[in-house]
Amino acid sequence: MNGEMGQVRTTLVENLKELHLPAMRGCFEETARRAEKETLSYEQYLLELAQRECEERRRKRIGKLLKESGLPLEKSLANFDGKRLPVKVSRQMKVLLEGGFLDRKENLLIFGNPGAGKSHLLCAIAQELIATRGRKIKYATCPLLVQDLLAAKRDLRLGKEIKKLAKYDGLIIDEMGYVQQSREEMEVVFTLLAERYERGSVLLTSNLPFSKWEGIFKDAMTTAAAIDRLVHHCVILELNIPSYRMEQAKKNRDAGLESAEAK
């Protein structure tokens, strides 16, 4: 009998391996013992095995999406001080985390002072959309994105590069305007924005209001066209709050003064 059961086990392991069901292969024996002890039905036993497999596949898929996204994972929602957010932004956050704006191909634009937490907030939103909704999102700072697009243009593959980015539900362009770029550099960004218009969402941060964007694109008509495409379908978050880094520096300085006075 034991020999027969051993053969059954071996064959089952081989079948599960051939069917690419590693989670089931790893837990079917333990689950079978518990099912027998708790007198679970065959259907309940099979359901638990299927759920284990689905959970493991989802975990791996989310891990792959997070790795592929290029997001700085330390900038998570858990590490973000939500109490600093303006009330209006807090209300908008609940809707954004549902991810409907990606389905509608709407853009998400975050403006605010340096150090206000724009990048952290945007990365945190993106991580949540990947982890809870399984969305495909790609992160890049504006300077690095520009370099990639310029290299593609030089190699006559700009179209292919933009098409590759089109597979993502959301494309993050972080720090727009932080570093001065040449007209040629920003022309490739405009080409990207034009191609994504109404085809995929752009998620963007900038410390410059639209009134100063001519300094980014170096041309009034290009600037107007870029802004027009971004704002036609968009959600705008304004973080007009003090710099988080400055606040922390002040707290540390005050704590140091209090410690010195106590001594």
Image (cartoon, rainbow, N blue to C red):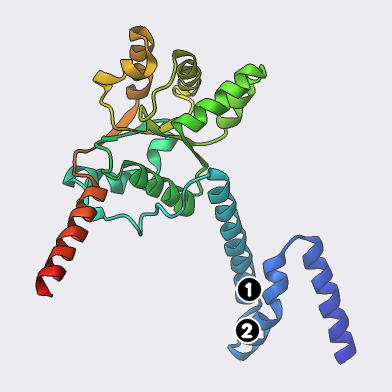
Q: Nearer the viewer, mark 1 or mark 2?
A: 2
Spatial CA distance of label 1 from label 2 is 10 Å
Q: What's under tag 2, amino acid-wise?
A: Ala
In the rendered structure, are the residues bearing label 1 and label 2 in contact, judged by CB atoms less than 8 Å apart?
no
252 w.r.t. 142: above or below: below
Q: Nearer the viewer, residue 6 or 63?
A: 63
Q: Quadrant of residue 202?
A: top left
**Is residue 108 positioned above or below 163 on the image?**
below
Which of the pair 40/253 is nearer the observer? 253
Considering only vertical position in the picture, is 230 above or below 255?
Answer: above
Report the side of 192 relative to 258 (left or right): right
Closer-to-camera residue (43/203): 203
Query: Which residue is at a point 18% across and 64% down the rendered structure image?
Result: 256
Quadrant of the rendered image containing residue 119: top left
Amino acid type, mark 1:
Glu
69 with respect to 45 (left or right)? left
At numbered mark 1, what does the secondary structure look like: helix, strand or loop? helix
- Quadrant of the image for the N terminus? bottom right
Where residue 140 appears, as percent x and y from the top left, is 48, 36
| Secondary element type, mark 2 | helix
Q: Which mark is residue 120?
A: none
**Residue corresponding to mark 1:** 43
